[in-house]
Amino acid sequence: MNTFRAARPRVLLTALAAGTLLLATACDDTAKPAQDQAAGTSAPAAASPAATPAPTARPTGEADPALKPFYGQQITWADCPADPKAVQAKIDTSGMRCGKLHVPLDYAAPATDAIDLALIKYPAAKPDQRVGSLMVNPGGPGGSGVEMVEYGAKDFVGALHDRFDVIGFDPRGTGNSSPVVCYDDKQHDALNQLDEPLDPAERKAAHVKQSTDHAAACQAKSGRLLPFVGTRNTARDLDVLRAVVGDKKLNYLGVSYGTYLGALYAEEFPKNTGRLVLDGAVDPAQDTLDHGVDQQIGFEKSFERFAADCVANHADECPLGKDKDAAAKKAADFLDGLHDNPLTTKDGRKLGRDLGWTGTMSMLYGDEKTSWQYLRVGLAMAMKMKRGDVLMAFADDYNGRDENGHYSPMEESNGAIGCADAARPAPTPEHAQAAVARLLAEAPLLSKGVTVADYSEPGCAYWPFRTPEKPHTVRAEGSAPILVVGSTGDPATPYASAEALAKGFADATLLTRVGEGHGAFGKGNTCIDRALEAYLTEGTMPAAGTRCT
């Protein structure tokens, strides 16, 4: 459940260039080019960015009289509704409880409108040893905290579940918490089927048109929500939840984008922090373009390590030849070739270049002990047998499409939250040129065809409003000590981001996992698991410089 919406390598370079990759892939108006080019899915012209003002600032917290109805509410916990997916996966949810949290839509005017957030609670297994609640967020932006607890309950079994009520919530604008909606399922399928143009001029024209159409579609269906789905408002929701469940201090586990949520919480409410674990960290001070470049390079390196491992250690099932130094290029050439020679899947859809790369890269969130084995199978089926169903299934899972063709709200909420969090101006020619030079030098396979022209527009250029949020160092002066966790082979949130986040905090310790894959929680690393348990249950911080192999 460690989700972080990384760019589809190479086919999302216009999004990366436009600065829409803050945290994950920010605006869907640019972050999903395969969706930006569908014919017959255009919407009315987008509203002027000035038409919808950004939310105004207002002090928040329990001391604000206007927020007392929210801080004073009581959650009605009840049995969770039946979930066919959980039943099919044989997941026991019988002990879990579900509820709703009522929060202001706009914290600047809390009496004007409100929304409900979906909650789930996995009550402490040993109530007599209970520390309190542990709030969790799996990443995204747009990932479901409810699903993290429901489907990932096994990751908490042991000391964490013994001593905490593990509570997940769907952040505002996501899941079952007033989700942002822009398209229906058929439109999603049509958009995902189309490959980004290879010609730079055609790519630019398609990007402008479809980005405009996308912003208008989201404004038409979810315009009321768009100015208020940013992470700072979610951090305020988190403080309401902390108080309502009776915790004086917030205990929190955030993975990937969830580290940004945790960082903003510590910035907004430093005196309310308890024990915060931020795993798979994002650097909130990093320029969005530079973050996207680092992420692209991270995926290239992971892709190369996967390919070399495939040839060296799994020759009997590896479709990438016998030369480990040429293996990654062989896979990349095949995936690029899907642009002109797509594979037809059993349900009649076409696995083109963009979906092929999406499915491939999604498997790099894991490591050689988990998802890499499935990627070997998927590539072998596609390259040797011309069957794209396995890679398509990987892409579907990443895109939130279930076996019935229904899409989760994550794609739309991912973009909306990103544009509510940061929108940078167009890069200078020098910055754009430097970004292209780095990509071509350090990620040539995933950056094929990128040009400076792809970087000419500001981030979220066609979004209906402008956010005041900007990248910045989070100090969180006065907070409790924070534990930041980074993995050396993390492609989605490179290790340097964890180093920067920990260094920026006034009081933080960095814990390192040496290994592949995104995030450290739930990876089965005993050293990491013990360190997290000791910190969360007892407040014992690992020694500075601790590295877990």
Image (cartoon, helix red, strand yellow):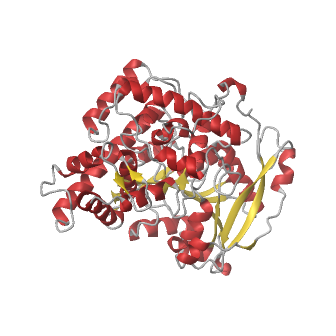
Name above or below for residue 112 compared with residue 309. above
Image: 493 above or below 473: below
The spot of residue 480 in percent (x, y) is 60, 53
**In the figure, residue 243 lies in which quadrant?**
bottom right
Q: Above or below — where is 538 with respect to 232? A: below
Residue 404 horizontal/vertical position (percent): 55, 63
The C terminus lies in which quarter of the figure?
bottom left
Please report the residue visible at 16 percent of the width from the left and 49 percent of the height from the top: 326
Which residue lies most toward the top here?
Answer: 429
Question: Can you say whether 179 is above or below 153 in the image?
Answer: above
The quarter of the picture where residue 253 lies is bottom right
Position of residue 406 measured from the top left corner of the image (x, y, whole percent): 57, 58
Total residue callouts: 0
Residue 152 appears left or right of 14:
right
Which residue shows up at 75% across the image and 54% down it?
Answer: 240
Lateral position of residue 9 relative to residue 246, left or right: left
Could you tell me if residue 260 is visible in this image? no
Spot occupied by residue 178 in the image (x, y as percentages of width and height): 71, 51
Which residue is farthest left? 322
Q: Nearer the viewer, residue 155 or 403?
A: 403
**Between 545 and 207, which is closer to the camera in this rendering?**
207
Residue drawn at (64%, 38%) of the image: 217
Q: Nearer the viewer, residue 504 or 421?
A: 421
Residue 11 visible in rendering: yes
Nearest the camera: 474 or 202? 202
Q: Which of the 4 image quarters holds residue 417? A: top right
